[in-house]
Amino acid sequence: MHGDEQAIRQLVATWLDASMAGDTETVLGLMTEDVVFLQPGQTPMRGRTGFAAAQSGLGKMRIEASSDIQEIRVFGEWAYCWNKLSVTISPEDGGDPVIRAGDVLSVLRKQAGTWQIFRDANMLTVVPKRT
C-alpha cells in the first residue's frame, strides 16, 4: 500500500476514534481551515468554525461509527477518498438512537506533509427504525 494511501486511511481512523471520544479539537486538526462540508438538504457547512458549531449541538450524545473505504486515489498533493460510513448517535439519557448511513466522498489536500480534508460530500441519510 502506498504511503499516502496509508496516511489517508489513518486520517479516517483518527477521525472516527476522535469523534467517538468527543475530541472535537483532534477532528478540527484533520481539516483545512477553509473546509466545506456538503450534506443532503442542508446549506454547506463552511470552515472549521462552522464544523465546531455544528458539533457543539450534539451535546450529551454518544457516537459510534464505522467506515468501509471503497477507493483512494492520490494525485500529487491532492487525493480523494470514497467511504461507506455508518454513524449511530445515541442520547446519553437513553433515548432512541439515530442511525445515519451512506457514502462520503472527501477531497483531501496535503499541506506541509500532512493530509487534511478540503471538501467533503456527505451523503448519509437516516436509516429507518425496524419495527
Image: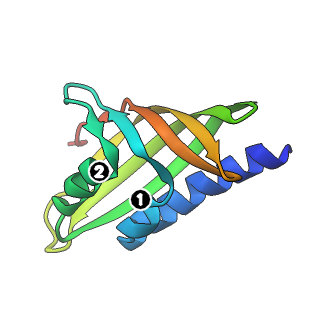
Q: Amino acid at mark 2?
A: Phe
Q: Around disc 2, counting alpha carbons within 10 Å, would you say few (fewer than 14), some (14 to 19), or many (20 or more)?
A: some
Residue 83, image quadrant: top right
Residue under numbered circle 1:
28
Q: Position of residue 15 (x, y in %)?
A: 50, 58
**Sequence order check: which comes first, mark 2 or mark 1?**
1
Cα–Cα gap, marks 2 and 1: 8 Å
At x 25% / y 42%, what residue is drawn? 130
Task: Judge from the rendering whether residue 56 lies leftward or rightward of residue 88; answer left or right.
Answer: left
Residue 100, image quadrant: top left
Q: Position of residue 110 (x, y in %)?
A: 65, 44
Vertical placement of residue 62 versus 96, above or below? below
Q: Are marks 2 and 1 in contact (CB under 8 Å)?
A: yes
Q: Amino acid at mark 1?
A: Leu
Residue under numbered circle 2:
51
Task: Judge from the rendering whether residue 5 lies leftward or rightward of residue 108; answer left or right.
Answer: right
